[in-house]
């Protein structure tokens, strides 16, 4: 626990990961976010610094976690001219947790090596509460020897984990996970929407689904919310659109046709265009139930 830790990106996931490590006895030395108020508030809570520059974050820690929104944000924090996380980063370990393209992870892996630093992927397949409780499921990639240097820390954050290979490989697996999850969610929304239009009792339909081949994890997590129109955000439609789009892009690069993922991506992109992107992914039911959104 002698390693000092910093976080860049302290939204709902990043902040709870920082709280978890603090609870486990690690020194959280710095937090940073483009939302200065969020960083200042968390810094006051954890008793750490909220530096004004990314270079100061790197200087304050041995291990720096990043949890940012997209590839552009990653390039901004690592590769911008002037202030960036690679300033004075020799010997540092960067653990990048957001769902991003495999290409950006490989780009950052190579860039880190050039400055004497190390970059790991730790892609998350869990919710906000899991981050707070140290029950994340993590897919990790990069150099396994570097992973071993932070393994004890990672184990405090996760209930299970899988090291899957070299740079970009965890991001590929995470894209697959979210692609299938989002397809399942869209399919459930259509099934419940059709059942509702036919006048069936939706509690009965969900019970039948749970006992048959229509069962799925998203039936458990999202089915009730779809029926009740309760879409408090755990995993946003905006993120679903981004993540399904990552899988779409990778498939096209490989010359694969994935029509179900294409349709699902289009549905989540439609949610975003309708101003529903901040709803939970269960909000895709708003597009399929009769009398809701067109």
Image (tube, rainbow, N blue to C red):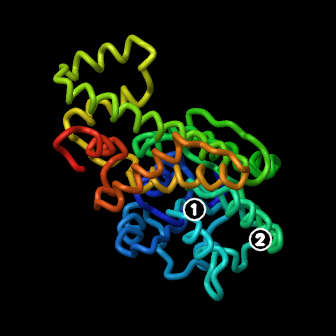
Crowdedness of circle 2 by 10 Å Cα count: few (<14), some, many (20+)?
some
Residue at the limit of the structure toward the bottom, as seen here: 82
The residue positioned 72% from the left and 78% from the top of the image is: 88
Question: Based on the displayed image, in which of its 4 quarters is residue 274 positioned?
Answer: bottom left
> Above or below — where is 200 with respect to 141?
above
Q: Nearer the viewer, mark 1 or mark 2?
A: 2
> Above or below — where is 33 with respect to 285?
below
Q: Position of residue 254 (x, y in %)?
A: 73, 50
Q: Position of residue 253 (x, y in %)?
A: 70, 55
Question: Based on the displayed image, in which of its 4 quarters is residue 177 positioned?
Answer: top right
Residue 66's label in the rendered image is 1
> Above or below — where is 33 with respect to 26?
below
Q: Nearer the viewer, residue 8 or 265?
A: 265
Crowdedness of circle 1 by 10 Å Cα count: few (<14), some, many (20+)?
many
Asked whether residue 178 is in view, the answer is no
Q: Position of residue 229 (x, y in %)?
A: 21, 40
The residue positioned 27% from the left and 18% from the top of the image is: 205
SS class, disc 2: helix
Q: Nearer the viewer, residue 4 or 228?
A: 228
Earlier residue among tags 1 and 2: 1
According to the image, label 2 marks what residue? Answer: 111
Q: CB of mark 1 within 8 Å of CB of mark 2?
A: no
Does residue 157 appear to the left or right of 252 in the view shown?
Answer: left
The residue positioned 63% from the left and 47% from the top of the image is: 153
Residue at the limit of the structure toward the top, as seen here: 211
Question: Based on the displayed image, in which of its 4 quarters is residue 228 positioned?
Answer: top left
SS class, disc 1: strand
- The mark tally for this picture is 2
Q: Position of residue 213 (x, y in %)?
A: 45, 15
């Amino acid at each position: 626990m002698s390693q000092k830790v910093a976080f860049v990106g302290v939204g709902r996931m990043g902040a709870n990961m920082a709280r978890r490590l603090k609870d486990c006895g690690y020194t959280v030395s710095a937090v940073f976010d483009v939302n200065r108020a969020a960083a200042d508030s968390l810094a006051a809570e954890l008793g750490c610094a909220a530096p004004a520059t990314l270079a100061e974050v790197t200087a304050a820690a041995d291990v720096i976690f990043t949890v940012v929104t997209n590839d552009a944000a990653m390039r901004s924090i690592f590769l911008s001219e002037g202030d960036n996380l690679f300033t004075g980063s020799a010997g540092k370990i960067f653990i990048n947790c957001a769902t991003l393209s495999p290409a950006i992870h490989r780009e950052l892996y190579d860039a880190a090596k050039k400055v004497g630093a190390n970059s790991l992927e730790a892609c998350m397949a869990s919710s906000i509460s899991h981050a707070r409780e140290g029950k994340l499921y993590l897919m990790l990639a990069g150099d396994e020897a570097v992973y071993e240097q932070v393994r004890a820390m990672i184990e405090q954050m996760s209930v299970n984990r899988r090291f899957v290979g070299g740079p970009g490989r965890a991001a590929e697996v995470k894209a697959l996970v979210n692609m299938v999850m989002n397809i399942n969610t869209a399919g459930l929304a259509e099934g419940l929407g059709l059942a509702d239009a036919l006048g069936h009792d939706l509690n009965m339909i969900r019970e039948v689904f749970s006992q048959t081949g229509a069962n799925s994890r998203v039936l458990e997590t999202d089915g009730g919310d779809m029926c009740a129109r309760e879409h408090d955000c755990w995993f946003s439609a905006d993120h679903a659109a981004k993540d399904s789009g990552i899988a779409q892009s990778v498939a096209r690069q490989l010359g694969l046709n994935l029509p179900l993922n294409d349709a699902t991506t289009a549905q989540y992109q439609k949610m975003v265009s309708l101003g529903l992107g901040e709803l939970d992914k269960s909000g895709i039911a708003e597009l399929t139930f009769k009398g809701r959104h067109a």
